Amino acid sequence: MAQAVEDWYQQMPIITRSYVTAAVVTTIGCSLDIISPSNLYLNPRLVMKNYEFWRLVTNFLYFRKMDLDFMFHMFFLARYCKLLEENSFRGRTADFFYMLLFGATVLTSIVIVGGNIPYLSESFAKIIFLSNSLTFMMVYVWSKQNPFIHMSFLGIFTFTAAYLPWVSKLLPMLHVIFF
């Protein structure tokens, strides 16, 4: 069994493997109180005034607590990041990295700009970790590149990949209902 997990991990493309590893290590480190989440969250004031530029990256690595929601996000991250890197961006690792960088920049910009708009700033101030958003961005990009692939949700109903982002948003709600 350990060999199968090691083979699966080694067969991941480099960007996917790096991101999944960094996310798992960061989340486990925070769960074990080795790393404090207060040193990782996105805080534009600390980035600009105290030059804490690592916050621009680390907020994409922490998935809060280790629970079923974390497992779903790791599944989506490993699966759809790998599929994008192996298929849509085959042989273009730099382009895939640029897409992730562009997505992270847009997400960060939305939070920073939204945090400075009156009446919206209070709700945007609550967004301090963007890891879930970046994961769903990759699911969205994959589903738009493969809209006609048939998928199944827990064997209950089938849908095409174009609707995967909507179905994947149901998973956290089902987690709350059933667990």
Image: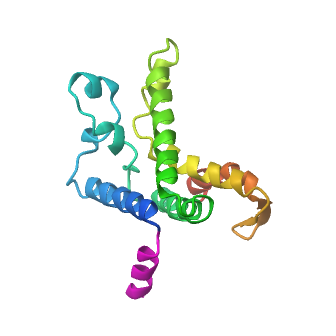
Q: Is residue 9 left or right of residue 139?
A: left
Magenta residues, as a range?
1-12
Magenta run includes residue 46: no
Q: Is residue 6 left or right of residue 87?
A: left
Tell me what residue is drawn at x 26 percent, y 57 percent. Answer: 29
Q: Is 4 located above or below residue 37 in the figure?
A: below
Q: Is residue 167 visible?
A: no
Q: Is residue 144 left or right of residue 172?
A: right
Q: Is residue 51 visible?
A: yes
Give the camera-side residue of 34 and 177.
34
Tell me what residue is drawn at x 46 percent, y 70 percent. Answer: 12
Main SS, magenta residues: helix
Tell me what residue is drawn at x 47 percent, y 21 percent. Answer: 113
**Residue 62 place in picture, x, y as percent:** 37, 49
**Residue 158 place in picture, x, y as percent:** 79, 64
**Residue 38 place in picture, x, y as percent:** 26, 39
